[in-house]
Image (tube, grey):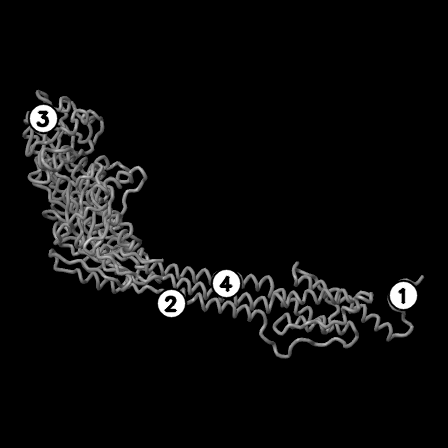
Amino acid sequence: MHEQDVPQAVSDAERRIAEDAASSVRASLDARATAVRRAAASVTPADGSPPAAVLRSLLPAGPPALGGSLLDPHTGKPLAASGETVPLTGADAVALARSGTANIAPRLVPSAGAEPRLLLFARVAVPAPGAKQDENHDQTPDGAGDQGAGERELLLVVSEKAAAPVVYGGGRTGQLVGRDGKVLASASATGTAPAPDTGDDTGPAAAADAANAGRHAGNRSGSMLGDGHDGLRRVAGWASVSAVDGKDDSSGLGLTMLTFRDVAPAQGGADHTWFALVAAGILVVIAALVTVALWGTVQLPLLRLHLSAARLARGVCDTSEAKKELARPVPVAAFGEPGRVGRALESIRRQLLGETGPETVRPVRRRPGLRSLVVVCALVIAVWAVPLLFVLNRAPADKAVPATAVADQQARTEAAADRVRQSLSQSCADLEAVASAISHASPERATEVLRREHAGHPTYRSLYVLDRTGAVVLRAGKQPLHTLGRAPTGRGITQVTTSGKIPAIVAYAQIPAAGNAQRAAGTTPAAVVAEIGVNALNDLVARPGLGKVWLTDEHHRVLAASTGFRAFQSLPSRALTRLVARTDAAPGSAGSPASGVLDAGTAPGEGLSVAAAAPLAQAGPAAGLGWQVVSAEPAAALRLAAYEIQARTMLAGLLALSVGVACLSWLHIVVVRPLRALTGCAERLADGDRRTVLYPVHHDECGSVTRNLELLRQALVERDRGVQADLTPGIAPSSQRDSAP
């Protein structure tokens, strides 16, 4: 294996960073489209209000909206306009209005300027001219079919710039690329200048082509490696902005997120070919030595025993040729069980010739046998395999992990923190809109608004309204875990509990002064509160390839995580806690991210990890919480050449040890253990045991020797009977008694 100048882990991280940026752009697009629809649904124009006044109530002041237009859906004629001219040449407003869909997807159209414009659409229900609307009539927000009597539907079109991407990491540039390969928006990491164009195959056109081809092949992201220039190489990642299911507002835009940065290529790594050849050569030598040892001490002596036992069995016949077979001594091996069986066969041969009687052939002192030889062979193989498993080609994480990979982990952790911050800030903004919508509404209307808002926000576990005393007067969703003791003022996010099984985190917004209907009903709603579910936070921090991620409070206790956790528990290791402490700052001030290679303690045996921590927010509603996002990815999980070499080295050692032990275990079961049983049978027969009948169990050399030993036992029994008959006068041999009339 050869080490690359740009590790694969760096390319994979750039692809993941592009995915994170694409997810942020997609969330921003969906939030803007939803905000325009919500504004259109919540507007309650007075009877006879001119279209210009309706449009002013719908458009926010200042960016991101550049211009707006209120159209007649039947003719496409503008009824009111504000800001810059909305470019409608690229979108058929009449066809869109008549499409029948409740939510019209955004469109990306060319404009008179250099940059295309993003058009957001919403249906607006206004009182029809000359129609009298019931003052208690509640307008239903979404969908053309929800239009009530005495109303007509208009089409709101808002023109915006394409959402600018947000990227992290020094020297990194992010570009939002259209379907045709043109750059719609560009941004660079804070404090860094955009990287110059190198003119290679890592540009916007290549990213757009790869994304367009990937949509048909099912690939939604990838990485590209450019040519070297000025001692650097460009690493680029691309990702499709649309969602996987294709049901979000950005799916039809064909946008692609491109991120790239120039990195210094690694110095020429070591070539491990010679190590592989030397290790393989040593293994071949060991295998040859083990084979020769087993052949010389097990297989060859066993074959000789097989031939000798068969020869002795032929020698017990009454023919003269057979008698000659008993005259030849039995060759005796010098080691182990084959030697003991050979000595027993030699003793049996001499007994058959009448030279001696039964004799003990067991050694006085037990010597090492074949089992010891098998153990020695296993140890020899282990001498080669164990260093590969635990010693050779070890990758020290603090040196094997390049600084670029550590910086990418920190950049992705910052992106995860920004994703959580955007979600919390959006919750506050949405609650502020809800507070404004229910401030002058009846209790029934306020309840309907709460239900609709809760259904449209999967992050909300519970949504409720508090009065001046802190009591819940309206609620949608589940029962709150822990309510605020008093009605808050302003808007923001707070952590209600610091202990317990489930953290209670809420976003709140103050409700403007109550209207006459609420005063008449005797209620004084003061604030609307949304309890944010922990599962939603878990989904926000979890990202593929980022490892284990935790969301911690100001005391470094876990509030949410990408894996299982216990609420308010400490981080897995002190090293992670010290890393998080480096990001601390005064509440409301800007903390600084930190990263490094350390023992994260996420799981036993994982070794060192690439860890990073980033403050959740430097501004906005979540800035005063003091929360951090912490991540830890095992260094061995990164696609680095050093770890791949380590893995392959360990695999080679594991395979050698496993195959060697398996083969030697098979040899012990099939040969050594039957041979030990055969040795006991042969020695007992030589020692004078004539009663035990020998049954062959195996159909191999050991079984053949056992069958021949049974023939020799029968011959010894006949010989002993003949000798007994000769020693007892007047008693005929058994053969003569059986043939007497």
CA distance for labels 4 and 3: 83 Å
| Amino acid type shown at disc 3 | Pro
Q: Quadrant of residue 355?
A: bottom right
Of the numbered discs 1 and 2, the one sitting upstream in the chain is 2
Mark 3, residue position: 78
Location of residue 194 in the rendering, given as x and y in whole percent from the top left corner: 14, 50
Looking at the image, can residue 479 be seen? no
CA distance for labels 1 and 4: 60 Å
Mark 2, residue position: 391
Structural crowding at the residue carrying mark 4, measured as other residues with C-alpha within 10 Å and reported as few (<14), some (14–19) or many (≥20): many
Location of residue 357 in the rendering, given as x and y in whole percent from the top left corner: 76, 76
76 and 322: which one is in front? Answer: 322
| Amino acid type shown at disc 4 | Gly
280 and 27: which one is in front? Answer: 280
Mark 4, residue position: 660
Q: Nearer the viewer, mark 3 or mark 2?
A: 2
CA distance for labels 2 and 4: 20 Å
Q: Quadrant of residue 78?
A: top left
> Which numbered marker is on residue 736?
1
| Amino acid type shown at disc 2 | Val
| Amino acid type shown at disc 1 | Gln
Q: Residue reaching furthest right? A: 741
Structural crowding at the residue carrying mark 2, measured as other residues with C-alpha within 10 Å and reported as few (<14), some (14–19) or many (≥20): few
**For the C terminus, which image quadrant?**
bottom right
Judging from the image, what secondary structure is the residue with disc 3 in? strand
